[in-house]
Image: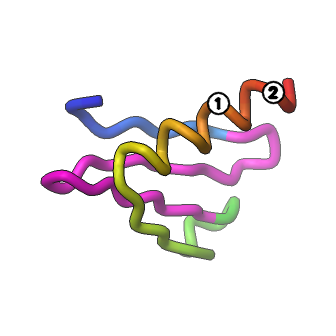
C-alpha cells in the first residue's frame, strides 16, 4: 500500500490506514470524527490484521 485508505462503517465510524516510512498508522474514528484510537504497526502486522479480518467475513 503506497497511499492512504479509509474504510467507512455503516454506523459512520472509519478506519484510516496511512503509510509512514516502513510503518503504518491506523486511525480509528467514531461517527462524530473524534479519534478513538491510533495504532502503529509494521507491514507484517498489517498483513496479519487484514488476513484475520478476511477470515471473519
**Relative to 1, 45 lies left or right:** right
Task: Give the residue displayed 21% in from the left and 31% down from the top.
Answer: 2
Figure check: 54 above or below 35: above
In the rendering, at what x and y percent does residue 10 appear? 80, 38
> Which quadrant of the figure contains the N terminus?
top left
Of 14 and 12, nearer the camera is: 14
Q: Is residue 27 found inside the magenta-colored segment of the image?
A: yes
Please provide the residue range marked out in magenta: 9-29
For the C terminus, give its image quadrant. top right
Left or right relative to 12: residue 33: left
**Circle 1 sits in a helix, a strand or a loop, which is it?**
helix
Classify 34 as above or below 25.
below
| Rendered position, 27 above or below 7 | below
Q: Are marks 1 and 2 in contact (CB under 8 Å)?
A: yes
Query: Can you give x and y, in whole percent of width and height, for residue 6 in the image?
Result: 47, 39
Find disc 1 in the rendering and name its residue: 51
Crowding near the residue tagged with mark 2, few <14, some 14–19, many ≥20 C-alpha atoms within 10 Å? few
Please report the residue visible at 60 percent of the width from the left and 50 percent of the height from the top.
Answer: 14
* SS assignment for the magenta stretch, majority: strand
Q: Which residue is mark 2?
A: 55
Amino acid at each position: 500500500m503506497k497511499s492512504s485508505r479509509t474504510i467507512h462503517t455503516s454506523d459512520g465510524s472509519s478506519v484510516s490506514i496511512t503509510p509512514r516510512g516502513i510503518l503504518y498508522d491506523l486511525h480509528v474514528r467514531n461517527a462524530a470524527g473524534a479519534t478513538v484510537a491510533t495504532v502503529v504497526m509494521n507491514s507484517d502486522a498489517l498483513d496479519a490484521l487484514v488476513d484475520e479480518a478476511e477470515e471473519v467475513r
